[in-house]
Image: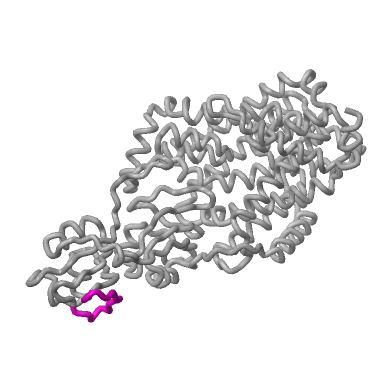
């Protein structure tokens, strides 16, 4: 033990990696599908190690990792944040702001009632609202206070203690409320409500990893019979023979040779065509007119699959059916999946496309290249991150946070470097959604910044809080836990009635929006599993940007209010 502590003192970074490794193992432990998660697991692991060993941790190391995380989270939610501010999204803006504001006021009221210091109050907020980044913004705000250094360190340690006590119910409470109690309060069967909305949107629900056997688009080979309906017709005539649908003649075999025809090519008897069309068109239009054959060589058609990044204003806000019907370049290109931020969006005829969405499409490379300018930008794989934009954005965000302040009553709350960096990430993420060539950072890099940055930061906070954890739990543990229950549930209860009776939101979408406003991915996943539907994720994607930005900022605000 003495040797191990000496190693931690000499190489403190080793203890951080140990805490992260143990934290991810702790985070994987689940009871009935619910666990602490990797971030809180890293915090708990850091507290355990810090309780037995002295580990010197510098504030500069923590800040560098935390700023990297904040930029990553801002970069991810930037497009969704600005998208929600437009047009009909005001109701989601209202819900996305209402729930975090109620959470802040509840945490402040509970902290005042329990006479907590700023550190406990901040941990009560971060744990009860399951927003671990608030640990970092609160820590920075505490270090800016005009109090002795030793007291600052004590307050910062108290953040970790309160967060660890309140986080578990923070997760379980949102799941329990949204997936169990809230539907009963509304008097609805949430699964049926989601299925109704799926029908309205034209969504066909699918379970993860399970796909229907039906294929809407097919490639098949047909031989033209002598004196048949297709003999003597041009490719252009064949491609327009089906009313309200398109048929694509991709390749032709004639006298053993395969070639790509143009629209003027005349199809003769005994020619074999490789056709792409909707299955019902192939069955009803071509079935009676030609003979289907198995021609493996002819059907070896290269099919491309690319991601399209939606940036065009003329496309944003339109339904998929509208685009299929009125954008000629969309014919022959088929949508496989759709992402909004990090969330998969259910695909239906009435699903609305928004700027910043990523569409995974399939078709010939030429067809996709023709469609791309009408949608936005074709995303080709890239590996390098634009570190110049990242570095300058973080620098600018820190400068802005250092000089900017927000008046709250008689107080002037300085934003600080953390919130400034978060806002810089939001702006860069939004700019990327408008100009895809700007600030390119691969999704994998953003994921690493977010996961490693926050896990390492909270692990280091836990290492410093370790020696104070057990005494603090004995003194305030029960009160903090009870207070955390209030902080978790009050925003959910008031948010439910506000969203349903004031904003008139659909129940399935509303419940997903509540999980997003409280940034509870676990609750969103539980709700999706309970409803067997992706509809709640639509609501989650509408509010999660506001949840991340506001709840992270509340770490700074509650320290100012409690000081």
Q: Can the viewer see residue 227?
A: yes
| Residue at image point 22% right, 70% down | 239
- Is residue 415 visible from the viewing direction of this image? no
Q: Is residue 312 left or right of residue 436?
A: left
Question: Residue extending furthest bottom?
Answer: 264
Residue 213 lies, in percent from the top left, at 30, 46
Which secondary structure class fits the magenta region best? loop
Left or right: 411 with respect to 533?
right
Q: Is residue 262 magenta?
A: yes
Total numbered labels? 0
The residue drawn where x is 37% and y is 70% is 367
439 magenta-colored: no
Asked whether 87 or 342 is in front, the reply is 342
Residue found 82% across the figure and 43% down from its top:
13
Compared to residue 487, the image places residue 202 above or below, namely below
Question: Percent x, y for residue 383?
Answer: 62, 62
The type of colouring in the image is one colour
Using the image as rendered, state which of residue 266 and residue 503 is in the foreground.
266
Taking depth in this image into account, of 77 and 250 the one nearest to the observer is 250
Query: Residue reaching furthest front?
Result: 256
User: In the rendered view, would you say 276 is above or below 155?
Assistant: below
Vertical relation: 63 (above or below) 44: below
Q: Which residues are magenta?
A: 254-266
Image quadrant in which you'd find residue 326: bottom left
Q: Residue at x 34, y 67 (%)?
A: 327
- Percent across and percent down for residue 496 are 49, 33
Task: Name the side, left or right, on which 272 lies relative to 192.
Answer: left
Residue 81 on image: x %, y %: 56, 53
Q: Dividing the image into 4 quarters, which one contains the N terminus?
A: top right
Image quarter hosting the C terminus: top right
Instruction: Give residue 553's quadrant in the image.
Output: top right
């Amino acid at each position: 033990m003495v040797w191990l502590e000496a190693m931690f003192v000499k190489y403190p970074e080793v203890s951080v990696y140990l805490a992260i490794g143990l934290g991810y193992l702790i985070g994987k432990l689940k009871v009935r599908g619910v666990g602490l998660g990797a971030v809180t697991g890293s915090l708990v692991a850091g507290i355990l190690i810090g309780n037995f060993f002295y580990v010197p941790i510098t504030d500069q190391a923590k800040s560098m990792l935390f700023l990297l995380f904040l930029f990553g989270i801002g970069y991810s939610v930037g497009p969704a944040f600005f998208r929600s501010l437009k047009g009909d999204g005001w109701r989601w803006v209202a819900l996305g702001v209402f729930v975090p504001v109620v959470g802040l006021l509840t945490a402040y009221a509970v902290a005042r009632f329990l006479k907590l210091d700023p550190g406990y109050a901040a941990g009560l907020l971060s744990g009860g609202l399951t927003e671990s980044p608030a640990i970092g913004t609160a820590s920075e705000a505490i270090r800016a206070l005009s109090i002795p250094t030793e007291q600052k360190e004590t307050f910062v340690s108290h953040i970790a203690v309160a967060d660890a006590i309140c986080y578990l119910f923070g997760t379980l409470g949102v799941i329990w409320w949204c997936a169990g109690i809230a539907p009963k309060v509304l008097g609805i069967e949430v699964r049926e409500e989601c299925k109704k909305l799926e029908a309205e949107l034209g969504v066909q629900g699918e379970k993860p990893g399970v796909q229907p056997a039906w294929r809407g688009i097919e490639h098949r080979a047909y031989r033209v019979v002598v004196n048949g309906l297709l003999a003597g017709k041009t490719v252009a005539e064949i491609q327009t023979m089906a009313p309200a649908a398109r048929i694509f003649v991709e390749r032709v075999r004639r006298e053993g040779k395969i070639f790509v025809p143009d629209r003027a090519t005349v199809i003769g008897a005994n020619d074999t065509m490789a056709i792409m069309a909707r299955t019902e068109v192939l069955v009803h239009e071509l079935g009676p007119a030609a003979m289907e054959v198995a021609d493996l060589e002819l059907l070896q058609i290269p099919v491309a699959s690319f991601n399209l990044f939606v940036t065009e204003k003329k496309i944003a806000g339109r339904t998929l059916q509208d685009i299929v019907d009125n954008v000629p370049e969309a014919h022959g290109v088929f949508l496989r999946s759709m992402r909004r931020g990090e969330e998969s969006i259910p695909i239906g005829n009435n699903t609305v496309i928004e700027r910043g969405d990523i569409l995974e499409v399939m078709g010939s490379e030429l067809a996709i290249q023709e469609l791309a300018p009408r949608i936005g930008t074709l995303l080709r794989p890239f590996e390098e991150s634009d570190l110049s934009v990242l570095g300058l954005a973080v620098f600018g965000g820190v400068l802005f946070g250092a000089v900017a302040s927000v008046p709250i009553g008689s107080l002037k709350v300085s934003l600080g470097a953390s919130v400034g960096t978060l806002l810089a990430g939001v702006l860069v993420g939004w700019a990327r959604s408008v100009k895809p060539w700007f600030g390119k950072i691969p999704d994998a890099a953003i994921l690493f910044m977010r996961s490693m940055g926050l896990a390492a930061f909270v692990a280091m906070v836990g290492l410093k809080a370790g020696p104070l954890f057990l005494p603090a739990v004995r003194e305030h543990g029960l009160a903090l836990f009870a207070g955390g229950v209030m902080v978790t549930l009050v925003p959910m209860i008031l948010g439910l009635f506000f969203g349903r009776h004031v904003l008139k939101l659909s129940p399935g979408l509303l419940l997903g929006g509540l999980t997003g406003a409280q940034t509870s991915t676990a609750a969103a996943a539980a709700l999706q599993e309970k409803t067997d539907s992706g509809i709640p994720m639509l609501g989650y994607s509408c509010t999660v940007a506001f949840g991340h930005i506001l709840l992270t900022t509340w770490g700074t605000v509650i320290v100012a209010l409690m000081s």
